[in-house]
Image (spheres, coloured by chain):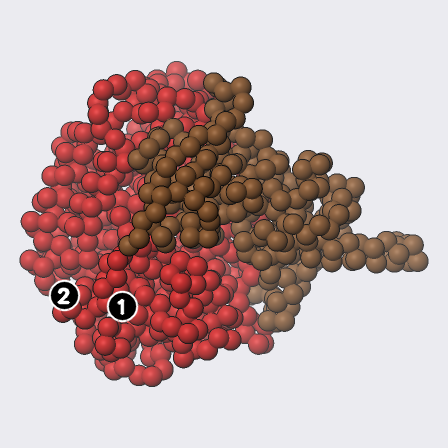
Amino acid sequence: MDMITTDIVIVGAGGAGLRAAIAIAEENPDLDIALLSKVYPMRSHTVAAEGGAAGVAKDNDSLDNHFNDTVTGGDWLCDQDAVDLFVEQAPKELTQMEHWGCPWSRDSDGGVAVRPFGGMKVERTWYAADKTGFHMLHTLFQTSLKYPAIKRYDEFYSTDLLVVDGRCCGVAAIEMRSGQLRLFRAKAVIIATGGAGRIFPFTTNGAIKTGDGMAMAYRAGVPLKDMEFIQYHPTGLPGTGILITEGSRGEGGILVNKDGYRYLQDYDLGPPDPWPRKKAMELGPRDRLSQAFWHEHQKGRTIDTPHGDVVHLDLRHLGEKMINERLPMVRDLAISYVGIDPVDAPIPVRPVVHYTMGGIDCDIEAKTSLDGLFAAGECACVSINGANRLGSNSLTELLVFGARAGRGAAKLAAASRSHTDETAIREQAQIAQNRVRKLFLNVGGGESIAGLRREMNITMEAGAGIYRTEESLNRSCAVMNDLRDRYARVELEDKSNVYNTDLIQALELGAMIDVAGAIATSALNRKESRGSHQRLDFKERNDETYLKHSLAHYDAREAPRIDYRDVVITRSKPGARVYGGESK
Amino acid sequence: MNERQVELEILRYDPETDQQPSFQIYLVPCQEDWVVLDAINYVKDNLDRTLSYRWSCHMAVCGSCGMMINGEPALSCKTFLRDLPETIRIEPLANFPIERDLVVVMDDFMNKLGKVKPYLLPREKKAVENGSYLQSPAQLKKFRQYTLCINCTLCYAACPQYAHNEGFVGPAALALAHRYNLDSRDVGRRARQDVVASNEGIWECSFVGACSDVCPEHVDPAGAIQQTKIASTIDYFKDLILPRRD
């Protein structure tokens, strides 16, 4: 097996991975960086983020405001020391993006413009029309081309972390072009592989978001934290799940039910002002809005379509000029994929799985409990997102913590004299090789990738969706356990080497089943309702028992073991989440 | 919902076993609101696990799923079956070597992107503490269109010049150089000229405009190249009249 020796391996070349790579190259140009991704960097799902990135920008706002909105939005499950650091770094990172050429939308005076987002007291979302993630990703990718130390390995699928004597010292990855497994030896490893929305059937997430990095870390003994918190975005297109940005509500779009009624006023989010009031109605937080949809559906006040029930997002009153200027992509997506021009008609939307708040357990330095391993971006859980991420915090998060992971890894690599012994690391890589080979050799197992994936998707939606019960979650847990057994009998139809997507999909499915097990088990064990985790059998938040992060520990045979860690509370004591006219 | 059946003729090629690429036919029952990518995914999940192709976002922004659809370069996630006949021929993007099935080798394009120095080269490095550069909406508007390229490479598949000379820097990379050249914060135009105004750069373009016709984001690379030609010509004469003016 070919071995590539470098200083730092980064797995994932989306926003967080690229930001980490640039941070390393700037911190210490002598370090070699291997940037691995299963796709070309521009394909990473950061590209699909639309609305913007939060950071205090104007005199009418403050770091305290950003802190409070984030902590309240997260239903007090955020670590407050991390949030303080995050809000303080946010404007600097966004300004750095500006210096790298990010085409932020501008005010008439030439300053960077900001727009309001859900759950936000003061507008602070920097945006580049409604393609913010796209512009950030391309700006980062293009900027990364300046640094010769960043060596890219595009279309390398990482299968395993290599751990010797309790230290992470590399990864094994399949070079998709040849089908060969390569061994990357490094002094530090950063995982930046994004979320796992594809565990669910209806999601805004692209096909690549299969939790690979989460699963790698999890199997290597790093716990997955707060996995029960899955964000449903309130406005996805029916059928495809394509995201319609919260920015469209930030600009003044309204949500109405089948009677044309702004139903959010019935869910403690009113009054229904004709103008967009911050932290109220359509600018409430995502968890509340998605839950309100669920109740409207129960009451029979949603609109039936072949792709499930919808409500209407009405932008008509914004006018064609504003829609073209601020929301051109939304207009194009609606015309293309549902045949509706939002200038003339309301857009049908329904809640859709969007974001995994939980992830690889790491600290404020982006370090995990495994020596030598860092994580950043959606795959990680610091946690600044708590039980419900505030819209537009994630693009900023991948900058702030991507850079931190990069700097931390650079310091560690510079301080490490020698590389791990080659024999020891080759032994680890051989185990990875055997796992992949076993998939190739399986014959007559009779289980299909598409079949197992469908069952996982349906079960997770039914059991671990917007509202959950002990019964539904027990069933999800049981099915995930069963799927793990059946996964051992998956048989590849494609036994070739070059760009074998049957193999890659099989590996992705294995990752998703493990991560789904962590989601379902963590949700089953949390007997309260908080943020995006809503239990019909435990309707109240229970701070006495559950003001804690849950940690799911991997077990190769059994369901994961769950234990808990206290949330870091510094200056905001848990209180009621108040939105609408009563909010301050 | 109405179902109809389409016939997909998909070009297959496995370099380990096949001498030549050849077409394979799949009959796919499909929904009327499907895009071509949905039909291909149906093949993958239900008919043939060995088919390889790239895709991710399904919303025309990641740029992975470009292919030739009935002879035209297009994003399969934004090409609707309702706009196509019953028989649909699907091939990998033209002008690129085939890696496997519908997957093409991207190396040449990736190298060219890097060559045009597609990053901001400011007059002087500004500290983050000193805040953002000012840029008026009008200044932003000047280059915004050229920031919209998703690197799907449909323009290379459509370009007769690239077909003829693979050394040609090509539409997307030249448009990206133009994007930075037009940015009010950038002074890197001269540094990019080596590649942009070389024999393999803008002067190789014969202005057929096929790149702009197929661009799913309306970036208009052909327009970018023509504007660059004019600017470079003015440079040339200025250099004659006022040598060493920098």
Horizontal and vertical percent for residue A494?
A: 36, 24
Judging from the image, what secondary structure is the residue with disc 2 in? helix
State the residue position of label 1.
A311
Q: Amino acid at mark 1?
A: Val
Residue occupying image coordinates x 39% and y 34%? B26
Residue A538 in the figure: left or right of residue A462: left
Chain B: drawing colour: brown
10 Å crowding of disc 2: few (<14), some (14-19), many (20+): few
Question: Which residue is rendered at x = 78% and y = 58% of the image?
Answer: B231
Chain given the colour red:
A
Answer with the quarter of the image where residue A349 lies: bottom left
Q: Nearer the viewer, residue A164 or A335?
A: A335
Chain assignment, label 1: A
| Residue at mark 2 shares a chain with residue at mark 1 | yes
Q: Is residue A377 above or below residue A94?
A: above
Q: Give the amino acid at mark 2.
A: Gln
Most foreground residue, A152 or B173 = B173
Q: Nearer the viewer, residue A383 or B146?
A: B146
Figure quadrant of the N terminus of chain A: top left
Q: Which residue is mark 2?
A: A298
Q: Position of residue B89 (x, y in %)?
A: 49, 39
**Residue A43 x %, y %:** 47, 45
Q: Indicate the chain on which mark 2 is placed.
A: A
The answer to whether residue A389 is seen in the rendering is no
Q: Is residue A321 left or right of residue A539?
A: right
Labelled disc at residue A176 = none
Location of residue A456 with respect to B131 vertically, above or below: above
